[in-house]
Amino acid sequence: MSQPPPGQPPHGGFGPPQNQPPQGQPQGGFGAPQQPPPQGEFGAPQQPPPQGGFGAPQQPGYGYPQQPPGPYAQPGPYGQAPGPYGQTPGPYGQAPYGTHPHPGAPGKPPGGKKRTALIAGAVAVALLLVGGTVYAVTSGGGDDGKPVAHPSGDTRHSATASPSADTGDGEGDGRADAEDLNAGRKPGEAKVLWYKPAPDAPGNGADAPGLWVTGKTAVKAAYKEIVGFRVADGTPAWAPVTLPHEVCAVTKRAGADGRIVVAYMNGTTDRAKCNQLQQIDLDTGKKGWHAQVADGTGLFDSTRSIELTLAGQTLMVGRDMSGTAYDAATGKKRYDLKKYGTDCYPAGYAGDGGRLVQVASCGAGGAKERDEIRELDPATGKAKWTRVVTKGWRAERVFSLNPLVVYLTNRDKKAWNISTLDHRGRFTSEVKVDKKFAPGCGFLSLNRGLQNCQAVAVDARTLYLPTESTTGANEIIAIGLADGKEKWRVKSPLARPMTPVGLQGGNLIAYADAAYTQGGRVLSIPTGSGAHRPTTLLRNPDGAAKIENGFFDATTVWSGGRFFIATNRLSGQDDSEEKLMMAYGE
């Protein structure tokens, strides 16, 4: 199915919600474009869009139709008013607001940050969005002892730089390295609290997914290990949890009980499957329940790769065309999600503390090919509502669950759309800002990865997206979810791009990327009325800038007044010590 890039005319592509269909929608990747979009960017047009904006229309009326309808726009039983940009049909049935030609790939790092996105499949399509991420990065939190996980903006960093200081083996008290890295620290600079090198990885590299921070512990997965360090000084919180084989999937956040679930391979051959589940307590490192995930029933529905989504007390394990739900606390199987209707298969899931949203691929390859978006009861898997997406549009990412903000693309039109749906699946608004955004969503592939965006933040009324910048400063734009219009924007105070990290106490927390000789900065930006001037919370030391700038495919977290940066991928190269994670504070 084609995908709409963010920024299409209003209502572009959502049809009116339908009554709950049976459970079980298709999963991964039906409808993904068969060839990657140009330049591998989220919705990036094949030629630079005018003004270099994310999704800026290349022809008059392409981005902002002169007439109303939008992706969800046809008036109907749900009282939706036709959208203002309604000429080209959008993802929800009519032309989505802000239809823009693909300006770049959705996964392009904001503002020139160099995060490398890994393609997990034979076909990968870069998401362009003249707009941005979101695994709705939420509040920094952590002071209450509850775990938080906030991916940073798409910060790709080279893995070649290695610390010149004596970094040790990562098993000491965590302080010696910091002392070296803080040598020559200037007035006003924060401290490197601790630094940890990565464990050895095979020559072809290995994943190091996830970064979870509680009030006590910072936890990271790396190859076959799960390691935990005390947030204040980096001393080991518990002995590393060593798994039989490589970690292949993780829950992006922890449950209310402070536990995560990781999946690991059942072997090392080409036929190995990602089907072993292990629960782990973040503060103690103790293993909880273990389970093995069964293959689906179809030929293309194996567990060679899976996705883990936590929704309330339910863990959803997504395969390519089905899903299995488990009780997150006990590991007991709850239900399966399979084909529903005549032609719909589950294709991806997004979840948070209270909601579970599923995207299904329907009618693949036929005249009625389309995506459907459904909200499910996490406890039972029953559909609460279903929203049909207009043919040609594909639901690629979910920026937020509360409110529900969806990013769609239309490959044929080289367009994108970011739309907000209410609690009944009704279209309420879509982004009408004509800029080239860098949401940090990674590359589009057959596997949906609905919550893969890392450079977006969302609160009850506002979406915060970073603009793209290959060199120099970028901007973060605040967009009202009620009408899709720009509320305000703020420019990076440094000659480097910044990205949203989370929301805390009414302020947007952002990270300004490090340069080779200058440390990065953690910034606080007021979101209420009045000025939106960034205030520096931490000024990372220039003496450690080479290391900070050298993290490969980085994830960042702001929690408890401390800033954590970690890699998501190990290269496996032996010519230099690889970095795993580093913490900063006062």
Image (spheres, rainbow, N blue to C red):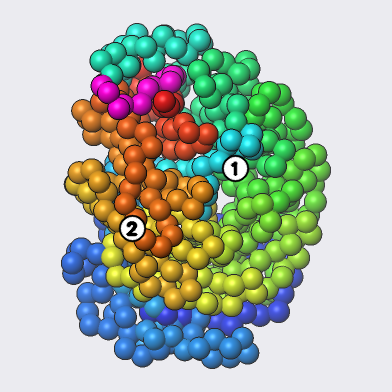
Q: Position of residue 265 (x, y in %)?
A: 60, 33
Tell whether 143 sits left or right of 555: right
Q: What range of the chain is rendered magenta?
A: 186-196
Please state if 421 lies on the left or on the right of 517 as rendered: right
Q: Residue at the location (56% across, 33% down)? A: 213
- For residue 246, what is the image quadrant? top right
| Residue nearest the observer in this picture, 486 or 342 | 486
What residue is rendered at 20% in x and 44% in y?
Answer: 495
Q: Nearer the viewer, residue 168 or 190?
A: 190
What secondary structure is found at the residue carrying circle 2? loop
Give amino acid for label 1.
Arg
| Above-or-below relation of 127 to 72 | above
The answer to whether residue 299 of the structure is visible from this angle is no
**Residue 544 covered by magenta stretch:** no
In the depicted structure, whether residue 526 falls above or below residue 570: below
Mark 1 or 2: the one toward you: 2
Name the disc covering residue 560, or none: none
Residue 220 on image: x %, y %: 53, 29
On residue 531, the disc is: 2
Q: Quadrant of residue 217?
A: top right
Residue at 69% over, 29% down: 281
Alpha carbon separation for disc pair 1 and 2: 33 Å
Label 1 Cα crowd, 10 Å radius (few <14 / some 14-19 / many 20+): many
Say which residue label 1 marks.
253
Q: Is residue 508 visible?
A: yes
